[in-house]
Amino acid sequence: MILAPTAVNQLIAVMAARFSENIESKGSPETMKNEFNYSIILVAVNQGYTDSVMQTAKKAGATGGTVIRARIADADQSEHFYGIALQEEREIVAIMTPGSTRDAIMEAINTEFGMRTDAQAILLSLPVEKVFKIS
């Protein structure tokens, strides 16, 4: 399933509203625990920057990653993201990492390749419930 940017924005807005209602009703913010040992970091970056992103990630503790070619869905409506023009063709770097190194990897990539650079990287991480090594 591919979500249009407006659908993603609406989903984020609903989740943020529910989270803020929860904080207001309890009087203090809840601390979310990450009970997962691994995370997958997804980095959407302009073409030609994946090798540099992986070098930076490895310096911060990553052991490897997978590059996936991608393109922006409905490029006519999403050619600007917060005033920054996006390329239609992108690449996604997927990095599986222990939770202990996730933040350092994400910070290093964001510092060097964030939205205000030519690479225009967008990062997110997702918890991974189970990991199996295929042999």
Image (cartoon, rainbow, N blue to C red):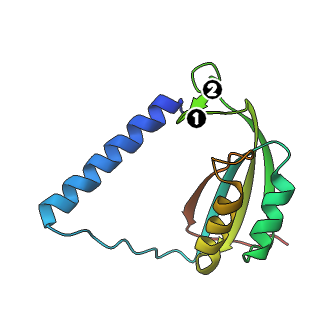
Within the image, what quadrant is residue 11 found in? top left
Q: Foreground: 122 or 131?
A: 122
Q: Which residue is mark 2?
A: 79
The relative height of residue 36 versus residue 19 in the rendered view (above or below) is below
The relative height of residue 30 versus residue 76 in the rendered view (above or below) is below
- The numbered mark, 2 or 1, whose residue comes first in the sequence reads 1
For mark 2, give the secondary structure.
Answer: loop
> Which quarter of the image is occupied by the C terminus?
bottom right
Instruction: Residue 114: give x, y in percent of width and height.
Output: 65, 53
The relative height of residue 125 versus residue 101 in the rendered view (above or below) is above
Task: State the residue at coordinates (65%, 23%).
Answer: 75
Instruction: Residue 6: give x, y in percent of width and height.
Output: 46, 29
Within the image, what quadrant is residue 101 found in? bottom right
Please give left or right for residue 120 compared with residue 129 in the image. Answer: right
Which of labels 2 and 1 is toward the front? 2
Please give left or right for residue 31 compared with residue 43 in the image. Answer: left
Task: State the residue at coordinates (79%, 72%).
Answer: 58
Q: Amino acid at mark 1?
A: Met
Please give left or right for residue 69 compared with residue 12 in the image. Answer: right
Q: Foreground: 107 or 135?
A: 107
The relative height of residue 114 versus residue 134 in the rendered view (above or below) is above
Q: Which residue is mark 1?
A: 1
